[in-house]
Amino acid sequence: MFYVFLIQGVQPMYVCLCHGITERDIESAVDEGVRSLKELSATLGVATQCGKCSCHAKQCLRESIDRRHEGQQMHYAAITAI
């Protein structure tokens, strides 16, 4: 199951080659509520075959959660400023 999406001419960065998982897939999983590598593995299969992607997958997961949190804070600040 390999999907390649081109958004504004940028190809996705693959995190898990065994399962064809990209950084965007991880971001989408975070949007759906995934908050740990264990949940990410259960949802997408990341780090369930060779395991070489686990460090990068954790980093992407952390960054996606941080970006989501920052976006929520900015949204809240915009609402309270009205």
Image: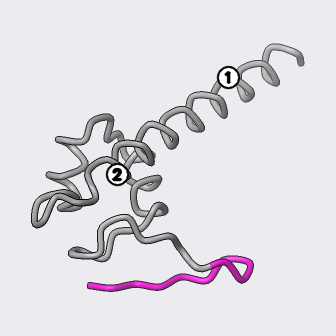
Label 2 residue SS: helix
Which residues fall within the magenta stretch?
A: 1-10
The residue beneath circle 1 is 73
Label 1 residue SS: helix
Horizontal side, residue 15 vs residue 10: left or right:
left
Residue at the image point whose x is 40% and y is 84% from the top: 3
Mark 2 neighbour density, 10 Å: few (under 14) some (14–19) many (20 or more): many
17 to 68, vertically: above or below: below
- Label 2 and label 1: CA atoms lie apart by 24 Å
> Which sits in the foreground, 72 or 13?
13
Horizontal side, residue 58 vs residue 40: left or right:
right
Q: Quadrant of the N terminus?
A: bottom left
* First-in-chain label (2 vs 1): 2
**Number of marks present in the image shown:** 2
Residue at the image point whose x is 31% and y is 76% from the top: 20
| Amino acid bearing label 2 | Ala
> Residue 61: where, in percent of width, then height?
40, 43
Horizontal side, residue 21 vs residue 45: left or right:
right
35 to 44, vertically: above or below: above
> Which sits in the foreground, 56 or 75?
56
Magenta stretch prevailing secondary structure: loop
The residue beneath circle 2 is 57
Mark 1 neighbour density, 10 Å: few (under 14) some (14–19) many (20 or more): few
| Amino acid bearing label 1 | Gln
Are the two marked residues, 2 and 1, in contact with CB atoms closer than 8 angstroms?
Answer: no
Horizontal side, residue 60 vs residue 82: left or right:
left
Q: Quadrant of the C terminus?
A: top right
Residue at the image point whose x is 10% and y is 66% from the top: 49
